[in-house]
Image (tube, helix red, strand yellow):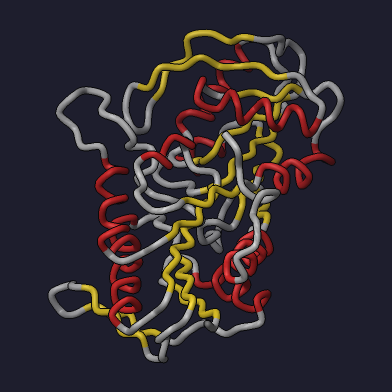
Amino acid sequence: MSLKVLSGSANLSLAKVIAKKLGVGLVCRLLERFPDSEMHVEIQESVRGDDVYIVQPTSPPVDEHLVELLFIADACRRAGAARLTAVIPYFGYARQDRRARGREPVGVRVIADLIRTAGLERVVALDLHSAAMEGALSVPLEHLSAVSLLAEAARSWVSAKTVVVAPDLGAVKLAERYGKILRLPVAIVHKTRLSGAEVAVQNITGEVGGKPVLIVDDMISTGGTVEAAIRALLAAGSAPDFIVIASHGLFVGPALERFGELPVRRFFSTDSVAVPTKLSLPVEAVSVAPLFAETIERLHHDRSLGDLIRHG
């Protein structure tokens, strides 16, 4: 059974590096839009009897990239692929894992059902918003983490006085992991979400007075959570010296404007989503291509992922 790698349009550069590290080329495919905006997909090489990996983060525009993934998977299934795995470096809709007000969908469950229906047999993802998402998927999930890669990239930017801060309760375990790797204390910002882009801070647990801060989260979207945390930390007397780490750097909506006014020396994220070519912020993207390539190689040969997958 041959190894084949395909890519949607969401992050072609990452897919190319992954394929190169695996010693294969990307399978040729056609992605186009009909005049009425319908998506059309065509696999232009044989994948019959092959072990196929589709690299496609469901990053903005989320719906378009999701449909691409599903159509590519269905096309491969109908073309006779023996095994189908979705490699989703950034998983859109992962935050919609519960109903907050009652009359809402559980978005991640709907997406999970679509993944199964498209014929995908396994999902490989990176630093999901909630590890509990595995319960929504009816196919096996390989949950990777970039925490160690990002911590090492940021090590030279922090000092023994730095405190690692979780910008909300959902990031506490993540902050503890960074704190353990970097041997730094941890503090917690307690927030209330007002909307998809606005949050309010209630209080801070931990000592931050006069200290430089390393804020960690799984993703930066509009930047509302990190902005609120920074302003609250400054009000609490922290040093005006911030480093921000997030596995997924989307930087959408008002994010650039927000961060342009704040004392952040450096942002660290991965290339799980396509890195904007003209980003006016000091962002360093750490490549996760080697991590995904190693994972695909092991899956192809039915080898253990025990030292690669994220536990909790």
Residue 106's x, y, as percent? 25, 37
Q: Quadrant of residue 303?
A: bottom right
Residue 43's x, y, as percent? 35, 85
Q: Residue at x 42, y 69 (%)?
A: 84
Residue 164's x, y, as percent? 70, 25
Q: Quadrant of residue 115?
A: bottom left
**Relative to 38, 72 lies left or right:** right
Give the vertical position of 188 relative to 120 (above or below): above
Give the vertical position of 165 relative to 53 (above or below): above
Which of 242/78 is in front? 78
Q: Residue at x 49, y 43 (%)?
A: 128
Give the vertical position of 167 relative to 197 (above or below): above
All told, the count of numbered labels is 0
Q: Residue at x 71, y 38 (%)?
A: 265
Which of 131/267 is in front? 131
Give the vertical position of 149 relative to 132 (above or below): below
Q: Residue at x 48, y 62 (%)?
A: 87
If the image is split into quadrants, where does the C terminus sit?
Answer: top right
Which of 42/224 is in front? 42
Residue 7's x, y, as percent? 46, 73
Farthest residue, direction bottom: 45
Q: Quadrant of residue 9?
A: bottom left
